Every structure is written in C-alpha cells, then in structure tokens.
Amino acid sequence: MSRTFVLVHGACHAGWTWRPVAERLRAHGHVVYMPTLPGLNAGDQRADVHLSDTVDYLVDYVERADVRNAVLVGHSWGGFPVSGAAARLATRISRLVYWSAFVPHSGETLIDLCPPAYGEMFRASAAGSPDNSVMFPFDVFCAAFLQDASPETQNLVYPLLERQPFHTMNEALDLDEWERLRLPSAYVLSKDDLALPPGEFAWAPRFPERLPGAPVIYTPGSHESQLTRPEALAEALIQASDG
C-alpha cells in the first residue's frame, strides 16, 4: 500500500539529509516530502527565527501541497515542530512517527530535555555567534551523532550542516491540544544512538512513554542512520506507518 511521508529533519540539518531514505521509500512506491524549515537553508537569516515559525511553516507546507493521509515523521529536534503542527494538521495525518526524537510537553524546551552540559554548550555557541545560532562542535557531532561513519564521511557531512536558530531550542510550545487528541503514533529508535547519554536523559523509555500505546520499533545505526543505514531506516518507517 502506497503511503505519503513528510520527513522533518533535526537541528542543524535540512531536507537533503533525508534523500537516501526518500530514494528507498520511493522505490517501494511511496510519496515523500522533505521540507527544510526556516533558518536551516543556506543563507537564511537566523536571529529572529522562532520555534513557532517552524511550526507555521510546516503547517503551511503541508496545506499548500494538499498532502493528505500523511505519515508525519520527526527526527531529533524535529519532534518539536511535528508535535506543534500535529493538532492543526490532524485531519491530514494518518500517523505521527518520532525517530530518535524529542516528544515535548507543553512548556518544555529542547534545552529543558537535554543534559545540562548540552544546554551550556548551546548557549555558549549562540552567544559566540553573530546571529544567535548554534552549531554542534565537530568532535561532539562525530562521536555522538555520526560515530558509525568513516572519518572521510564525517568530514564530508559536517561542513554541510547549517547553524540552528537558538530561539528554536530555548522556546516552548502549547501542546495541550496535541496531547488531548492522542493521534496514532509510533516511536522508532536507532539502536546505537549516542546523541543522548544513557540514564535519565536517554531517548527511551522517556519519550516513547509519552505516546500511550505507541509501538517502539528499533533500527540499526547511529543518530544519523538516515545517512549511514538508510535502507534499514526506510524499512522501520514503513513498519511504523502500519502501526
């Protein structure tokens, strides 16, 4: 059965990072959209991009494309705009899928949900930037996000990342309606994801537990499995889309 996927990227990423997965989903007969959210295009102005702007953009993108029965997928930080858009797009969504993603509640920021050291790193990066934006340090990105890739691949991917508007990391959303609706959801987790440390700040079971009744589907690879294990991730997303 053909499905329609809207794939939402994580922080410092853009739609292009989904291409290897999109190619495989399309090969299975599915339709795929890969928006790039505000502030994450090369040359974007970032200082005044707020979290609500990314939600508004995602809603408008789906409505303008007249996407229906969509499987709306959020990766990592992408769980924020996906959650924020979900209630407004409820009639157009068949399922929400969070892949190694934050599942926020009302009033929670990304920094709230990260280890304190991450918050310090993000604040320092924004303070040292000319446009209130954040970038992961190269060593952190390679060791915790893309550790299953060769040094050559790490050195190729890192310069392609974009700086993340800081307001999208230190602002929260009103998600009361999303929580009330309890839209059909699934959680996909990369088995070797080190982006969040084990313990109280780990992806699981913390975030899947926020999706009552949602299946948890495991896929091999790191936090960047869309680049390192795209076939396996595509298969996991197809499985998640079926509930």
Image (tube, rainbow, N blue to C red):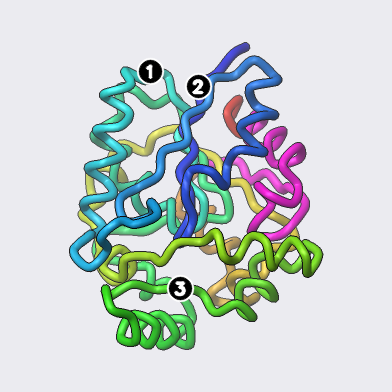
10 Å neighbourhood of mark 3: few (<14), some, or many (≥20)? some
Q: Residue at x 27, y 23 (%)?
A: 64
- The residue labelled by disc 2 is 4
The relative height of residue 197 versus residue 178 in the rendered view (above or below) is below
- The residue labelled by disc 1 is 68
Q: Where residue 234 sits: x, y (%)?
A: 68, 35
> Which quadrant would the N terminus be assigned to in this image?
top right
Asked whether 46 or 79 is in front, the reply is: 46
10 Å neighbourhood of mark 1: few (<14), some, or many (≥20)? some
10 Å neighbourhood of mark 2: few (<14), some, or many (≥20)? many
Q: Residue at x 26, y 68 (%)?
A: 167
- The residue labelled by disc 3 is 135
Q: Residue at x 38, y 68 (%)?
A: 110
**Which amino acid type corresponds to the residue marked 3 in the rendered image?**
Met
Question: Marks 2/1: CA distance?
Answer: 8 Å
Label 2 with label 1: CB-CB less than 8 Å: yes
Q: Secondary structure at mark 2?
A: strand
**Which amino acid type corresponds to the residue marked 1 in the rendered image?**
Arg
> Which quadrant would the C terminus be assigned to in this image?
top right
Question: Marks 1/3: CA distance?
Answer: 34 Å
Image-based side of 147 in relation to 116, left or right: right
The relative height of residue 116 versus residue 215 in the rendered view (above or below) is below
Q: Is residue 229 magenta?
A: yes
Q: Residue at x 22, y 68 (%)?
A: 47
Label 2 with label 3: CB-CB less than 8 Å: no
| Label 2 vs 3, first from the N-terminus | 2
The residue range painted magenta reads 214-239
| Label 1 vs 3, first from the N-terminus | 1
Q: Where residue 70 sits: x, y (%)?
A: 44, 24
Q: Secondary structure at mark 1?
A: loop
